[in-house]
Amino acid sequence: MVCLFLLTESTAWGSPIKSPFPASGEWTFDARTRKVYELVLNLQVEEAHQLIPHPETVQEHYVTALAEALELLITEDGEKYTEYEDRFNQRLERKTKLSTPDDLFLQAEIRMHWTFVYLKFGHEFDAALNLRQAYLTVQEIRDKFPKFQSIKKTSGLLEVIIGSVPQKYNWVLGLLNIEGSTKTGLDELESIRLSDSPLAFEANVIHALIQGFLLQQPAAGINEIQRTLNNFPQNRLLLFLGSALSVKSNDSENALILLDSLRKQPDGLPLYYADYLRGEIYLHKAEYLNSISSFRWFINNYHGQNGVKDAFYKIGLCYWLNGNTNDAQEIFQQAKSVGKEASEADKYAARSLAESELPHVKLTRARYAMDGGYNDQAKQILDSLQPQELPTKRDRVEYSYRKARLFHKLHEIEPAKLFYQESIELSGDEDWYYAPNACLQLGYIFWNAGDTVLAKSYFTKALSYNKHEYKNSIDSKAKSALAQIKRK
């Protein structure tokens, strides 16, 4: 969710752009506010607040609200949360006094900001209400100002988010009486990103991250981000998002390059999550001492709770994979009582910590090697495994699943299909994530091959698994794929 919020806010800057839309009023910035916007999007929020200490215009309120929301999402600063929430509520009161398309656009945007802030701070009911109000405000703009094209940036993201809500939250959408479509959302974003609108840059970044994080097309997503970085090579937000997407895209080497570039741009909000990403990358590279150091830096400096349990767990994992059993056991014990279990990474860590057996060393090394794009190393590890080294049912299921993932990454589709199917059959009714993700991946394989019937059956089957640790993300991806197939 944090990444989805960040991708909504990656708006362009530079010299003014002439809009191709009718002169009925589109969202624009004057030179001063654009400069502040540039600072905010470089995560230099303190400097931005100094230039606009008391916002007056709609655009000034927008950039100030954006700075506040980004700061809360990045730092999880509980002390500033109350202060910024009061300012958010004061901005909401503007709607009763003003009703231009710009005013309504501001309302929709700040509602979206606080949907993600509330989610970050664990207030799901408030998040749902603000999502609905953003949705209703978008409808109001469409009804009153049908020529106001800028709203497609907001509505496009809303459509994608609502259209991809995990199955277990469908009752919330029904209760709120809202619905969305991933395909419609992407089309709206496309119309902005391919135009001369001042929001085209933003829509392009949103589109890239949706490709990489939601639609499982990481190559397309990272290519779009990289093209944008070519134009703005020093922008901290883009470097951070690019590194996160590269890790997600199994390209740890590129992620490390971007993080090194980010480290050379120290001004602005501290990005401690970048150290978490470094920990991930070094774990992928089997550089366990460097990984431990990076995760510890994250834990010691970050004031929030998200990712902390997972970071502790992975420190223990590094010790375990490095043969230091005593330190591993000590850290695993600590990890049980720290952080919270909101993110899927933290949930997976908590579930792993609750199990009686520690993870299989070779399979775990192969997993993280593949996660980083080090497929040759993963292949060597998997090829070295003997049947007697896989004594449990879970070991055998995971072995088949890892083989499938490796073949898939190597574009050897036929053996990938066989091993995915084998992992599904071996799993049976177990509540591990291997089978549902195997179904998801088979759905993508058949979809890419043009067999939408089999693709739909596997996406639907992926949704049928309950209680596994990655249910939210797998369900979201499966729902998004099914929606796209339906509309084609």
Image (cartoon, grey):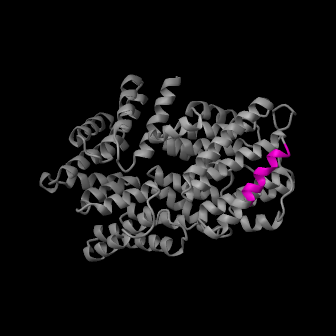
Q: What residue is shown at x 41% (from left), y 63% (from top)?
A: 310
Q: Residue furthest front?
A: 175
Q: What residue is shown at x 77% (from left), y 64% (from top)?
A: 48
Magenta region, residue range? 87-98
Choose between 249 and 45: the one closer to the eye: 45
Q: Is residue 234 rendered to the left or right of residue 161?
A: right
Percent x, y for residue 391? 14, 54
Choose between 259 and 327: the one closer to the eye: 327
Q: Is residue 106 rendered to the left or right of residue 325?
A: right
On the question of residue 14 being in view, the answer is: no
Percent x, y for residue 155? 67, 37
- The stretch drawn in magenta includes residue 88: yes
- The stretch drawn in magenta includes residue 43: no
Percent x, y for residue 429? 24, 41
Q: What residue is shown at x 23% (from left), y 46% (from top)?
A: 397
In the picture, residue 103 is in which quadrant?
top right
